[in-house]
Image (spheres, helix red, strand yellow):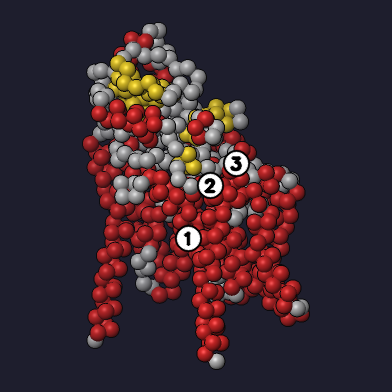
Amino acid sequence: MRVAGETRGLTAVLAAHAPWLLAIAWSVLLLGPALAPGFVLSYDMVWVPDLAVRPDVWGLGTSLPRAVPSDAVVALLDDVVPGMWLQKLVLLGSLAAGGIGAAGLVGDRALVARLAAVTLWIWNPLVVERLVLGQWPVLVGYGVLPWVLLAGRRWRASGRLPVRLGWLVPLGSLSVSTGLVTCLALLAVTGRRRALPAAGLLLAGQAPWLVAGLLHAGDATSAASGAQVFALRGEGLLPAPLAALGLGGVWNAEVVPASREGLVAAVSLCVLAGLCAVGVRSALARVPRHDHWALFACWAVGFGLAVAGWALPGAVGWLAAHVPGGGTLRDGSRLLVLCAPLLVVLVAHGTDVAVTRLRATAAGAAVVSLGVAAVLWPVAVMPDAALGASGRLTAVEYPSAYADLRRVVRDDAPPGDVLVLPLTSYRQPEWNDDHKVLDPTPRVVTRDAVGSDALVVSGVRLPGEDPRVLDAAAALTLSTPGERSAALVRLGFGVVVVDDDRPAAPSVAGTPLLDADGLRAVALDGAEPASAPWWWTALLAVAWAAYAALPSGAIVLGVLRSRRSEADTGS
């Protein structure tokens, strides 16, 4: 009897922790070689050993603050955790935490249903495509989303503000798009009674990018042609709207797994739709009424905005060109993040219903087989996502020239900002296994750096928004190296860095600082660094104080509640 009891206890413990274990396992399998020592550099994902805390990470630069607040958060944290390991912690933690949170959304269902939710949350086209595209803040927001929904649900039910929201909201607001996702999710799930305090909480979480964006509002419009370029795309046999139903449809065909280009993608969508259909009645009966309206509202907004660029590119382009910040809607497929919670809830309920029905009519082996299939099918239909998207995500070491560049710019260069040439956004260096990545040079140096923010997508050139880049490009058209240098000095540049792996850049006259491994740095004397108006600094200080108040307040509130609980227990 004692042995049997111990066995049942062990089984219960394993069942309780199985979603955690599976989430970690799928995350490790998905990332694969990306977890090895080194940096993962892919498209927009540019991490460096030590990102400097400098004015532009706070939103005080001349370029649009697209990396606010994410760059500042990384710049502060990598002083505690080395940048290489911080990147791996962020990637692995975002995936695993999201899967565990997805299981929590269906915590009252059978174990097989919770495991199915874990797998689908982690192993889907949205995660893989955004991972290869390097949009790690999107993945952090995605990982936080189910926990925001769970905390909002608890807040609505108990009337007591969950302490964890003080951490979840800042983490879910590392970029504009993820901030909007967090706002909509929390407002939808908390309901009207909590709308005002929830709005205040969310406003503090969005304050850095919101204030920085308003300060740059004059430059915050973008080319209308970008709406067509970044619009939802079909995958294989699936037209764009159907690809979006399965959380696919990213605009960049280079990051789409090969398995999504054939018949298997259509099969995957059919399986997903079938499980959702089977689970609808169970979800409607068992999920609280307000919650299924909240989940549907999130799905409808996410799907609608994702499809808008495909269905109405003219309207989305007009918004981008005429409304400051409207360009956020160009890549609407990022907002498919909002569709994931409803899908995993329906699939989990569908799995639960299917397994329960089969258990009543079939042998145990058939039930086990169905349960295993329900958990594994997302992996089976997209096996090339494994091991860093079949080796597309690998860890590499920076050439020593980058550390030398950081040192000479910090210690030997005259005053002034850094201009990075040539004026092209992406590099494809051999040392990064010929994978495309945004130029890492601006993040390596310790001063504010200016590089191209123009993009070329599918042969279409999208002009950048930073007026200082345009001024520098005009200076480089002057006749002689001396004239170019003088013009750049007047613009506040004290260092010019040239990447010789790219097409030749116009030469400038100055003092050589570095020439190693394809990197050259030239010092320009006499520059006065550009600086933002004092009132910009004041406004952003308030915004960042509000942002920092959320985790700080969570710590204080947690301590006070703990002491009160101890006092109540003692009495």
Where, quadrant-wise, is the C terminus in this rendering?
Answer: bottom left
Quadrant of res 231: top right
The image's mark for residue 178 is none
Disc 3 marks a residue whose amino acid type is Val
Measure how far apart labels 2 and 3 are at the Cα level.
Answer: 17 Å
The image's mark for residue 255 is 3
Measure how far apart labels 3 and 1 are at the Cα level.
Answer: 24 Å
Disc 2 marks a residue whose amino acid type is Pro
Check contact, mark 3 vs mark 1: CB within 8 A: no
Question: Position of 320 compared to 548: left or right?
Answer: right
Q: Say what secondary structure mark 3 lies in.
A: helix
Sequence-first disc among 3 and 1: 1
Can you identify the residue that label 2 sits on? Answer: 33
Can you identify the residue that label 1 sits on? Answer: 97
Residue placed at 40% from the left, 75% from the top? Answer: 158
Query: Mark 1 packing: few (<14 Cα in 10 Å), some, or many (20+)?
Result: many
User: How far across and down, in percent of the image, does residue 24 sit?
Assistant: 51, 60
User: How far across and down, in percent of the image, does residue 221 sit?
Assistant: 46, 34
| Residue 71 shows in the view | yes
Query: Mark 2 packing: few (<14 Cα in 10 Å), some, or many (20+)?
Result: many
Question: Position of 142 compared to 498: left or right?
Answer: right
